[in-house]
Image: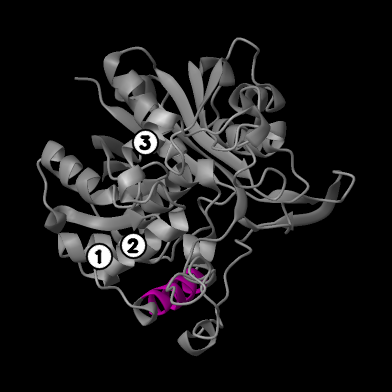
């Protein structure tokens, strides 16, 4: 069987809301990662069979197939097609699944899977235009009416904390550790191979001489004492979830260059990892964020592995309660999770996060000489993707 292999994975730095990336158009920012992948690997872009781009808020500057617009902005030949998909927060992880599965099936030789979200300009919820209709139809609403109806992701995070007995201090401690680990990883240069420098644009959207090379949202001076002073974000009276123990609103793009092993060999490119197993799972759309638990169990079974075989773990820190509940349910030492920090410190640019985390997972496997890496993330509507890769070389 043909192996789908990863040749390279890159991402922009994460820009905080209204920060250094605020003046980038999403298609142009996504084009930066596309250009980097072909330039870094001396690849003729005409060989790319397809570009699959994850994006959640497909409206305004992110509408009309932002993936195709990014391909043209990158200067790729007009013959290179692209599509844009939405599996909520897991969009660019799903893009990788579709790309790699297409390679394994023989439909592609070379594919780029990536994602983009410029949340400063196209904020969360922007695609829900009430005048044009509510996305949850009467039948779906009726299905969950007896349970009080559908709720926000923040309320889902609160429900998860209740179900798994997770305290406010547990979540604040996890958040502080995320910032500390991200700061240490940055200081030690662990992100240097995955981050591509991008110009900071002025308010007229012209490039300045200043380049952005590191993630903007890391707060190394965070402490549990400081975080304890913050008010709950979703339950004003007795909530546990705050802005500080939740993922940051972030601008960014990411991309993964995927090929068949035979195509890589013919081009003289050295694969860095192979896709070992895939899974996608549905879960309760009220708690919404528990999907990584069944998805992880499924991908381990499909891959013929156990958690003891996994050397590096990346689980998206949408809210601190999500990885904490996942670790409790699967009996995983939380110290093994997100060793370079996660979305609480590094940000969560929605559609870009899946490929962003893959870049980090790949580089950490190489840094530590690990063999298997696991990536999983919760998704709006009650879903989750899970991916296992095997380092090569």
- Alpha carbon separation for disc pair 2 and 3: 21 Å
Of badges 2 and 3, nearer the viewer stands 3
Q: Residue at x 39, y 17 (%)?
A: 109
- x%, y% of residue 244? 52, 72
Work out whether residue 27 can be spotted: no
Crowd band around label 2 with a 10 angstrom C-alpha radius: few (<14), some (14–19), many (20+):
some
Q: Which quarter of the image is occupied by the N terminus?
A: top left
Q: Would you place residue 293 above or below residue 111 in this image?
A: below
Q: Secondary structure at mark 3?
A: helix
Work out whether residue 43 can be spotted: yes
Q: Residue at x 43, y 77 (%)?
A: 238
**Residue under label 3:** 142
Q: Dividing the picture into quarters, in which one does residue 317 lie?
A: bottom left
**Residue under label 2:** 159
- Alpha carbon separation for disc pair 1 and 3: 24 Å
Q: Would you place residue 269 above or below residue 204 in this image?
A: above
Crowd band around label 3 with a 10 angstrom C-alpha radius: few (<14), some (14–19), many (20+):
few
User: Which label number is shown at residue 262?
Assistant: none
- Asked if marks 1 and 2 touch (Cβ < 8 Å), the reply is yes
Please give the range of residues in magenta.
171-184
Magenta residue check for 172: yes
Q: Secondary structure at mark 1?
A: helix
Left or right: 291 as drawn, with respect to 120: left
- Alpha carbon separation for disc pair 1 and 2: 6 Å
- x%, y% of residue 63? 66, 28
Crowd band around label 1 with a 10 angstrom C-alpha radius: few (<14), some (14–19), many (20+):
few
**Residue under label 1:** 163
């Amino acid at each position: 069987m043909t192996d789908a292999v990863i040749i390279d994975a890159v991402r922009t730095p994460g820009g905080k809301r209204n920060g250094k990336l605020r003046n980038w158009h999403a298609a142009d920012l996504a084009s930066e990662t596309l250009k980097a992948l072909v330039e870094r690997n001396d690849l003729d872009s005409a060989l790319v069979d397809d570009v699959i781009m994850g994006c959640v808020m497909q409206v305004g500057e992110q509408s009309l197939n932002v993936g195709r617009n990014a391909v043209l902005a990158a200067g790729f030949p007009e013959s290179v097609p692209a599509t844009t998909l939405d599996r909520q927060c897991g969009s660019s992880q799903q893009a990788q699944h579709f790309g790699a599965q297409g390679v394994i099936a023989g439909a592609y030789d070379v594919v780029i899977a990536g994602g983009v979200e410029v949340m400063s300009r196209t904020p969360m919820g922007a695609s829900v235009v009430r005048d044009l209709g509510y996305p949850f139809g009467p039948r779906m609403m009726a299905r969950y009416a007896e349970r009080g109806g559908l709720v926000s992701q923040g309320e889902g995070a609160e429900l998860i904390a209740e179900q798994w007995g997770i305290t406010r201090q547990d979540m604040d401690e996890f958040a502080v550790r995320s910032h500390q680990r991200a700061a240490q990883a940055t200081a030690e240069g662990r992100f240097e191979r995955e981050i591509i420098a991008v110009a900071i644009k002025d308010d007229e959207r012209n490039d300045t001489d200043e380049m952005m090379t590191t993630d903007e949202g890391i707060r190394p001076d965070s402490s549990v004492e400081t975080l304890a002073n913050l008010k709950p974000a979703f339950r004003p009276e007795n909530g546990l979830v705050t802005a500080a123990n939740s993922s940051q609103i972030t601008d960014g793009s990411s991309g993964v260059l995927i090929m068949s092993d035979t195509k890589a060999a013919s081009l003289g490119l050295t694969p860095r990892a192979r896709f070992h197993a895939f899974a996608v799972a549905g879960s309760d759309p009220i708690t919404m964020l528990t999907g990584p638990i069944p998805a992880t169990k499924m991908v381990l079974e499909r891959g013929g592995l156990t958690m003891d075989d996994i050397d590096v773990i990346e689980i998206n820190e949408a809210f601190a309660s999500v990885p904490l509940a996942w670790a409790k349910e699967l009996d995983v030492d939380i110290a093994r999770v997100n060793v370079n920090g996660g979305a609480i410190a590094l940000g969560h640019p929605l559609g870009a996060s899946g490929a962003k985390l893959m870049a980090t997972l790949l580089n950490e496997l190489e840094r530590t000489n690990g063999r298997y890496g696991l990536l999983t993330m919760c998704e709006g509507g009650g879903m989750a993707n899970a991916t296992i890769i095997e380092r090569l070389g």
